[in-house]
Amino acid sequence: MCPINNGNERIQSNKSSILSPEEIKAIESWISQMGKYFFETARQKMVTAKKTLKFKYKLIGHGDNRVVYDLNNGYVLKIALSEVGLIGNANEAYLYNNCNEEVQKYLCPVKEFGSGWIIMKKMDINVPLTIMKYKKLIELELECLRYDIIPIDLRLANVAFSEDNEMVIIDYGLFIMDLKSPVLRWFV
Ligand SMILES: Nc1ncnc2c1ncn2[C@@H]1O[C@H](COP(=O)(O)OP(=O)(O)O)[C@@H](O)[C@H]1O
Ligand SMILES: [Mg+2]
């Protein structure tokens, strides 16, 4: 488990209070072979990752860079499908643990983070969209900018809702906060 990430850690500890050692091993095995599928589509990578991981959990989503499982305990597990996914996980752990609390309240809480994976609170992704939600998305964007965070890739597919019906950002893997932000490793 690695709840605090100060941005200097390139190698994370790989222990979890939620995942079993076998599950961690399965993730490590997938991450070690992920590079072979570089030229495949995100969907193909997701199918291959699912077959390799053989998890009992329900797969509830995927984007271009991560596959997401419902851990059935109020949390989701996001596993990298690509190098950008690895960086995105590290970036989210860093941002959540180091950002201003005014911004943190809009970020989906990070529970644990390890090499190639991150566990976050499960949010409601099935809320119908209304014009108010577009307005809220713009407000969230401005709020990030106000605290010097560049919210790259903030869009409706990357937000969800808390129990109090508040909009929360579930994918902030590409946000840039400062020079220590793991996402900047992509450029060096
Ligand atoms: N915290 C969460 N709660 C519920 N669903 C989630 C959560 N995080 C991600 N998802 C689902 O998984 C999808 C992909 O996750 P995301 O973090 O956007 O991956 P990527 O970095 O590949 O874009 C989301 O669009 C959403 O449907
Ligand atoms: Mg996304």
Image (cartoon, helix red, strand yellow):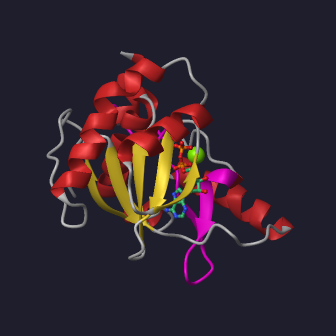
- Whether 10 is drawn above or below 66: the answer is above
Q: As drawn, is 16 to the left or to the right of 95? A: left
- Residue 138 seen in the figure: yes
Where in the figure is residue 184, as x and y percent of width and height? 39, 27
Where in the figure is residue 124, as x and y percent of width and height? 60, 72
**Along the line of sight, the residue nearer the viewer: 83 or 182:** 83
**Image quarter of residue 104:** bottom left
Residue located at (58% from left, 54% from top): 61
Q: Is residue 186 magenta?
A: no
| Quadrant placement of the N terminus | bottom left
Where in the figure is residue 176, as x and y percent of width and height? 45, 38
Q: As drawn, is 2 to the left or to the right of 103? A: left
- Whether 58 is drawn above or below 21: the answer is below
- Whether 137 is drawn above or below 174: the answer is below
| Quadrant placement of the C terminus | top left
Residue located at (37% from left, 46% from top): 53
Q: Residue furthest bottom?
A: 164
Residue located at (43% from left, 63% from top): 57
Q: Residue furthest right?
A: 131
- Whether 67 is drawn above or below 176: the answer is below
- Residue 149 seen in the figure: no
**Along the line of sight, the residue nearer the viewer: 156 or 124:** 124
Principal SS element in the magenta part?
loop
Report the span colored magenta: 157-179
Where in the figure is residue 155, as x and y percent of width and height? 68, 49
**Along the line of sight, the residue nearer the viewer: 165 or 157:** 157
